[in-house]
Structure formats: structure tokens, C-alpha cells
Amino acid sequence: LPREESLNQFRIPTRYWEAKRKLTKETIKQFDLGYDIANDAVTIPVRTETGTLLGVTRRYLAADAFPRYKYPKGFHKRDHLFGSWLVAEDDSITSVALTEGAIDAMWLWQCGYPAMAIYGSSISDTQIRTLQRLGIRKITLFFDNDKAGRTIVKLCCGWKYNEHADRWKKYPELDLRKKFVVENVSWVGLPARCKDANNLSPSQVRLLMRTATPLP
């Protein structure tokens, strides 16, 4: 495992986090965000729920970068929840928002809402067990305002798409509603440019959190 001192090489000033992502110096410090000058990428440290450093995720800044993100070697997204270590540090947190990506989760923390990212487009049974272990009782789904985001909501209700059979199949053990109180935010009425949490103003985030409704 990498040592904490390995993050020193990325503690290089960059305007990206403040200018492009609206993150404050406090949030940048809280998550130890950095810049990898050699690869022209910003860095996001990833940790276990106990806070052990696993490495950094790189987000490449070049317009034509593909893939956009590079995760630490040996890091399996389905086994972790970004931000879980912050939730673990505070026993009073029993309600969290779930986002797809780390940047959206950090933005929600800055807006005053504990949040964790599922690192992608589906939630795993390992992540569900982590939520239970952390004592979470209520979840607000804050996924992206697009087809992929709406698909994740369906997955959280226990549905999976079977490509061979070309149909959706129900898996009750993956239905979050059997283990938590689950709400979903509504993007109705927001400008079309609002695609994810980080596109929203703090007041818009508060509105979506306040008007989130239980999944049927």
C-alpha cells in the first residue's frame, strides 16, 4: 500500500478544483486533492472505510483524454465507496446521498450533505454491506440526470438487465428498499445543462435534497 507521504508529490497548486469544480480550499484540503504535473491530471486520493490510503485516481485534463480516469492498480471499484472513511468517522451520520462519481460526492459534502460515490454505474452487494456496516438507515439517490443515472435507480430497486434473454430480471437481494429508506431526487424543472450534482448551485442541491421522494 502507498504511504501517506506519497501524496506530497501531488500537492501542487492548480486552479482546476476551484475554478472548474467550485470547490473551496477547505474541501480541497479535506479530500487532499492534488495535481499530477507529469501526466497533466488532477488527483483524488482513494481510501478504505478505515481511512487506509489505496492510491490516487487520476482525472486527465486533456480534451481528448481516453480513458478520462485512471484508478490505482489493483483497485476494484465495486468493493469501495468514495467518502466512506468520512462517514465512518462520524457515528451520528445515518443518512447519506449516493452519487456516481467522487467529484459529485465532494460537492454534496461541501453543500452540507454527507455523500458517498459508487464509482460508476451500478451498486454492488459489497457496497450494500458497507452501507449497512456504517449504520446507514436512509439513502438519497443523487445520480446523474441522464439515461445512465435513471438506469442506476432501477438497479437500486433490484433489477438487472440480462443481455442473453434481452429482458430485466428482479434480484430482491439487491433491492436497497429492503434494507434502507430510499429516496430519489427529481431533476424536473432544472435547466438542461444540469447533468450532475456538481453542475448545481448550493441552493439547487438543497432544493433537490428537500424535495426527494421515496422510491415506490
Image: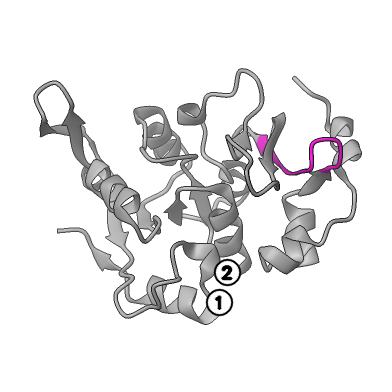
Could you say where residue 89 lies in the image, as x and y percent from the top left?
63, 47
Q: Residue at x 53, y 68 (%)?
A: 199
Query: Residue type at mark 2?
Result: Gly
Q: Which residues are magenta?
A: 36-46
Q: Which residue is mark 2?
A: 112
Above or below, 196 against 169 in this view is below
Dominant secondary structure, magenta: strand
* Circle number at residue 215: none
Question: Can residue 38 be found in the magenta stretch?
Answer: yes
CB of mark 2 within 8 Å of CB of mark 1? yes
Front residue of 17 and 178: 17
Q: Could you say whether the residue bearing mark 2 is in a helix, strand or loop?
A: loop
Please give left or right for residue 201 compared with residue 207 in the image: right
In 3D space, how far apart are the residues under numbered discs 2 and 1 (Cα atoms)? 9 Å
**Quarter containing the C terminus:** bottom left
Q: Which residue is mark 1?
A: 202
Q: Residue at x 90, y 39 (%)?
A: 8
Question: Can residue 212 be found in the magenta stretch?
Answer: no
Please give left or right for residue 117 compared with residue 126 in the image: right
Please give left or right for residue 8 compared with residue 40 in the image: right
Q: Residue at x 33, y 70 (%)?
A: 187
Could you say where residue 98 lies in the image, as x and y percent from the top left?
43, 52
Front residue of 62 and 169: 62
Could you say where residue 177 lies in the image, as x and y percent from the top left?
23, 48
